[in-house]
Amino acid sequence: MSVQIDNSQPAPLPLAAGTARGPWATAVRRLMRNRSAVASVLALLMVALLTLLAPLYASYLGVDPFRSNLRGTIEIAGEAVPVMQQSTSGLGLGVTPIGPTWSPGGYMLGADNQGRDVAARLLYGGRNSLYIATAATLICLVLATLIGLVAGFMGGVVDMVLSRILDVLWAFPVYLLAISLSIVLLTSTIDLGLFTITAGSLALPIFIIGIIYVPYVARPVRARVLTLRQSEFVLAAVGLGLPTHRILRRDILPNLMPTIIVFVPILLALAIVTESALSYLSIGVQPPDASWGTIIQDGQTLLYSRPIVALAPGIAIVITVLALNVLGDAVRDSLDPRGQVP
Amino acid sequence: MLATITARLAQMVFVMFGISVLVFLIFFATPGSDPAARIAGRNAAPETVEQIRQEFGFDRALPVQYAIMMKRLFITRDLTSFVNRGQKVIPQVLDAVPATLSLVAGAAVLWVLGSLFVGVVAAAMRDTVVDRGLMILSLIGISMPVFWLGEVMNLMSQSRFHDTWLFSWVPGLGYVPLSESLGGWFKALVIPWITLAILYIGIYGRILRANLIEAYSEDYIRTARAKGLSPTRIMLRHALSTSLLPFVTMFGLDFGALVGGAALLTEVVFGLNGVGRLTFHALQNLDLPVILATVIYASFFVVAANAIVDMLYAVIDPRVRK
Amino acid sequence: MTIWTRYATLTGAAALLSATALTAGAETREEMMAAHRGGEMRLVAAAAGGTIDPQINYTLQYWQLFYFTYDGLVTFKRVEGAGAGEVVPDLAEAMPDVSADGLTYTFKLRQGLKFSDGSDVGVDDVVASFQRIFKVSGPTAGTFYNGIVGADACMATPADCTLEGGISADPASNTVIITLTAPDPEFLYKISVPHASILPAEAPLEDAGVTPIPGTGPYMFESYNPNESLVAVRNPHFKEWSVDAQPDGFVDSITFDFGLSAEAQVTAVQNGQADWMFDQPPTDRLAEIGTLNADQVYVNTLTAFWYAPFNTNIAPFNDVRVRQAVNYAIDRDALVGIFGGPVLAQPVCTILPPGFPGHEDKCDYTANPGTDWTAPDMEKALALVAESGTAGQKVTIVVDDTSVMREVGTYLQSVLTDLGYDASVNSISGNIQFTYIQNTNNNVQISVSQWYQDYPAASNFLNVLLGCDSFHPGSDSSVNISGYCNPEIDARMKAVMQLATTDPDAANLEWAKIDQAMMAEAPVAPLFTPKHVDLVSKRVGNFLFSPQHQWLMSQAWVQ
């Protein structure tokens, strides 16, 4: 009798939708299903949009937020009120900028020391701050990951040299360098062949901030790499004789992602604040341009009379960093198939 | 072991020497840094400025000036400031050390305890309201510039609410030496400690939480859970110990830098006569002797802290082997 | 009873008068001394003021202290207000006999005076002190005291300075004779400032630094740590010899603490933790202290001005039209607002401040030229810029990093941008900025600076700031920041300084004309004249202020 050999495949199980996709697509899908992640992306987009629309807002208000407006007036309830108000009580000392009007029609958050509209400057400032902070954070993370990876994995002399370089970087008095740079760039420029650096080049704060925080990320990365180097799958890969760059790329780097991602919102916030110190020294964002950092500095001199000027950019920073943090957590969760805390 | 330590010490000296040379070069590369006219005084006659220049040796070659300054700093130890003439630099720095140490040590205790609490609780109660709340607080802590926070603390504790029960115990700004009064020392430092610690609690809390969550996905935690260990025990004895590596690494970086004078804005805002404030004034005045002294002092602590942390790796996480 | 400072505000901004009024019932000094003597006065400042050597230190911060720790042969009268411009005999018994040709001054030294270390004050100390000015290379050695015979030799080789022929002493008759190379109507002023303090002959022949030198005043410095504090206590060997020159002090000790920021200083004084703050209150506290602490605030006129020097030797400010345009365009009321309002500042258009000898109210660079500044004239300014054809050029304003000056700089940047320039403003540390803007190698086009009087003479402003002799290209010490040198006006200034020896009033009229002649070429843009704000604690009494000494600290009490 002939035996029928059933060579057909068993009936395919009905595949659950989506399981046939790759890991990246899975990650994205899970991300999109995470409500807080979506919310944070939307928040970030809103912040970005608002800052990009700054010129529109300024023209709607009819103000130039970069022009001193010390003798200007605004209309409140039909009356022309001076933007810089002289004290009339007691000895009549001091001139205070107008406080928040809370009306989008003008001086919503009040005026600063030059009589300029803080809300409009906040929007413009967002562009500079976000640009500088994002670029600096990227540079820092890329450099730090590279250095930490190589130092941690290679060990020996390479590790020693790189670690000492990190030591020098971390111990270096950046403030002195910044003061020196600011004086050098006062009335001259530095010519580097391809580029010229002036006091107002945003490349300056971007690179300074990007580089000075490298040790802060590189050393934890290096520590993590030292641990990972002893894990079984890495030892196996080494034993198999796989090339180093493959091991680094395929085995170690993905396991570093959580360590690196958690630094993103931290670095961003630190970058914005550090930028404020640099622009105080006239490096980077120059007056009358604004960044959240410069507005905070302006607000320092108004702390006792108009605290909102320093508070508003701080709140903006918190919102941005918060959204990024939520997003970062969600990204990390979606990439990691197992992360579960009981 | 001894060989490693010696090698490390040699590297440390090299780093410190390198930084001092860099600082020296940057100073003289800065236009307007020439101290002669500033030392001579406002509107001094050209002859006077020239006399000062010769007296202080500013007309000699840079390497010679560097050598002389290093000699006066380390060998004869009589290097004096350009701005506060006659005041020796080394005693200045040493006098400032207690204030900085007090500030940094106290803040460190606060931030280590605080971030441990925040990190552990946030990881344990992940995705609950508590976790979200702690995350928001941490990020607020990171986003507040220290100079702003310090001034706001002063505004509240010294000015606006000074007379209320909340802050009436706060003494005037300034450092009270421990030898003078323990209570005074403590009361004067409480608010500076909190101000300095808030930033680091935010950072370290986030980092610890992330590491803990990652640790929980490891196999040994699954094993521990399968063994029936209590969640607290798992968290505190297994997950935490392996998450401490990046924590300790960063602590070494931060503590080392702070002891060396990185808390300069905190010291300035609270009127604490520490190494940070000394550095700050020296930089503002381009007072080269004090700058050199404080930079060498700071780099020593940074490098030493990193060296100690490296040696602690093997203790903390046995998986780390060279 | 406390002395109040009253002020009158005129609507429409501009002129402000400051007058002092004594309260009724003058208590005698003995009564006041009996009632209020004693206590410790606590002062605060952000930073120390440098060396404690009175012949080198050139800061207002420490000159205030030197006035009650050291004495000269003569000194400025220790009274409030304009009376302090009068020179009175101090260590000398009486005003000196001046020879007919104005070259020789003969001083008779008082007997029986002692330094704080117990040694007697003798004529050899006087001679040694004048020699010491050159030996320590004091900042004014070459500017104030180079008129003494033998000074050039001293400037050339300070270590061997003898001032031979310039100063001689006769111990028998207790007289000192100073001989000048040319008559100098300002000589008595010059030896009244702390740089000419009489110190013991054994005082170290180099910068004393942090080691106090014994003095003759009612107080002596006990200890000085520039990072912590400066302590002055009563001089046990002091006996009051002249109330006008060096009155005894009320408090037993004065402690000057360093390290608090200006904001913290205001709060400390408000809380009674300090009695006075050296730094000016930050602008965001002014309204608060003017309201809550009105009876603890004293506002006084200073003979000083804020100005923006133009570099007259490089573009675009080498064109007089551009300089005039900026003068027309600046809204000085806006700057007054930045400084704290019309109560604290007043717009100026001349180099000599109001109330100064030689000042005449005049303003050309305003909408309606006349005696006062009223409003900017932007049209005229733009027309001048168009004429000069310099629009579009890059201009950098260099200011220091104090908050008021940064705001002034930002405002000036806005003005220059309105005028059509590509303007930017840079701030550098205050201790560096002043020397940086003086050095022509740095090519600073425009900056912002302040000038305070050393003594009440017009030359102290016009000749020092804008005379050819004050311009030293390539040097950090070239206080003629504008680099302005007009030989004709320079000759007029030399002539009027001669005239002042014989006819001071005519000289002052001529100074006014010189002022206007200079302003016609606008080497600088005068901005405003500031008033000084002193915030004291509740317990401080008898607050007296003079433009020369500022707050007469030794005359106030704390209990």
Image (tube, coloured by chain):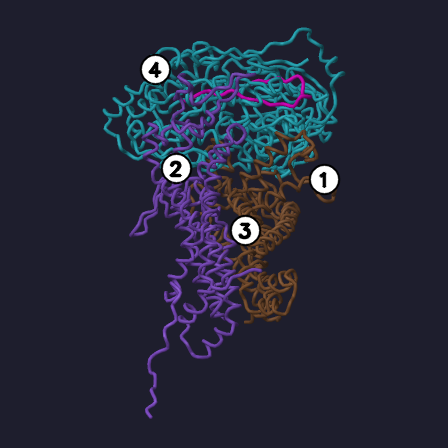
Chain colours: A purple, B brown, C cyan
- The residue that disc 2 covers is A123
User: Which residue is situated farthest in the right direction here?
Assistant: C34
Q: Nearer the viewer, residue C433 or B35?
A: C433
Picture quadrant where residue C448 is located: top left
Q: Is residue A66 magenta?
A: no
Q: Determine whether label 1 and label 2 are within 8 Å by CB.
A: no
Q: Amino acid at mark 3?
A: Ile
User: How far is disc 3 from disc 1 in space, using C-alphas?
Assistant: 30 Å
Q: Amino acid at mark 1?
A: Gly
- The residue that disc 1 covers is B184
The residue stretch that appears in magenta:
C527-546
Q: Is residue C349 left or right of residue C110?
A: left
> Callout 2: helix, strand or loop?
helix
User: Which residue is situated farthest in the front direction here?
Assistant: A1
- The residue that disc 4 covers is C364
Q: Nearer the viewer, mark 1 or mark 4?
A: 1
Q: Are marks 3 and 1 on the same chain?
A: yes
Residue B300 lies, with reference to residue C360, above or below; the image says below
Residue B203, disc: 3
Q: Residue at x 49, y 50 (%)?
A: A266
User: How far is disc 4 from disc 2 in space, using C-alphas?
Assistant: 42 Å
Q: Nearer the viewer, mark 1 or mark 2?
A: 2
